[in-house]
Image (tube, grey):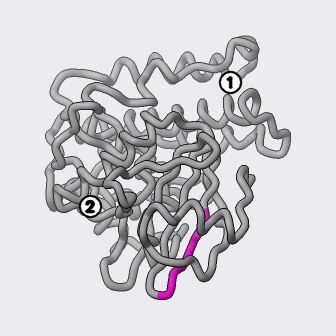
Amino acid sequence: MALYTKLDEKQINKITSVFDIGRVVRFRALEGGSENSNYRIETDDKAYVLTLCEAKSKETVRKLASLLTHLETNGFKSSRVLPTSNGDYLSSYRGKPILLKEFLHGEIVEDLHEETLFEIGALMAALHAVPVPEYMQNRFLYGIETLTVPDAFVDHPFAGWVADAKKTISENICDGLRRGLIHGDIFFNNVVITQDAGPIIMDFEEAGHYYLIFDLGMAIVGSCCDAGIVNRSKVNALVSGYQSISPLSPIEAAKLKPFAAYAASVTACWRFGQFHVIQPDKTKQDRYLEMKQIADTILSIPNEEFCP
């Protein structure tokens, strides 16, 4: 991913001076983040992540900071955001909102072990028990209405597939499905595997108030697939971990499969729009096909074989 804002040592120290963390002795740009510029910075005794939000408004970033502090207050461990010397959690640089978070020491693991997935499932159940903040009530970025393609591509073959997927998914949204605080994007690269605290879920930028099984479905898509193929043993581990804390109701268990397909479909739509219109990139324009294939594969699995 591109580093949108390049900073030198002098600029880094000026930006971080409002956080009272001391002098920065080392820093380096971090990869990843399609809408942010991220730096790992170190003082004499601690490491942090400095995030410059390139596309989000100050209001949106302030709500993200509020959510992270809300999670901490409710005992859910994630990225800890630091306040400035005046108690605000938001700073800015050249008009761009800035957050400073404690660095999570660990590693990103693409091929997650089943034991780890069980832990992640249990963590998700704990997250879903956290009260939804007032400012997030009934808000989520990837509702059923986002299953669409840009207007310029209405004749593209993908448009017909999306229309069919939307119809199938709409038929499976029903009463009896619990809603609550969800992460919305639990792919393997949004989980840090630490030595002392196990897996930690991070990057809550897509969080919202929505169906809990959508979150579980997205985690299946993002953490339980090997080279585009659904690994049912991994699915079983993740869902079993979740149910060890919060058992699914019969209707939720029955609808988990279409909601996992929903998660894959909405991710396919995001990738299609992102790399065809928002940030056109011919080398990535076919990335949506991976998620399309996963959605089709999920729907082909017999119901009784999908949810443990």
Question: On the image, which quarter does residue 105 sit in?
Answer: bottom left
The residue carrying mark 2 is 123
User: With respect to residue 113, does 134 lie above or below?
Assistant: above
What secondary structure is marked by label 2? helix
User: With respect to residue 176, does 242 lie above or below?
Assistant: below
Quarter of the image with the C terminus in it: bottom left
Specify which label sits upstream in the sequence, 2 or 1.
Answer: 2
Q: Is residue 40 magenta?
A: yes
Q: Amino acid at mark 2?
A: Leu
287 sits left or right of 168 in the view: right
Residue drawn at x 48%, y 37% is: 58
Depth order, front residue of 232/169? 169
Depth order, front residue of 132/91? 91
Quarter of the image with the N terminus in it: bottom right
- Furthest residue to the right? 282
Residue drawn at x 29%, y 32% is: 136
The residue carrying mark 1 is 158
Which residues lie in the magenta part?
39-44
What secondary structure is marked by label 1? helix
Residue drawn at x 64%, y 17% is: 160
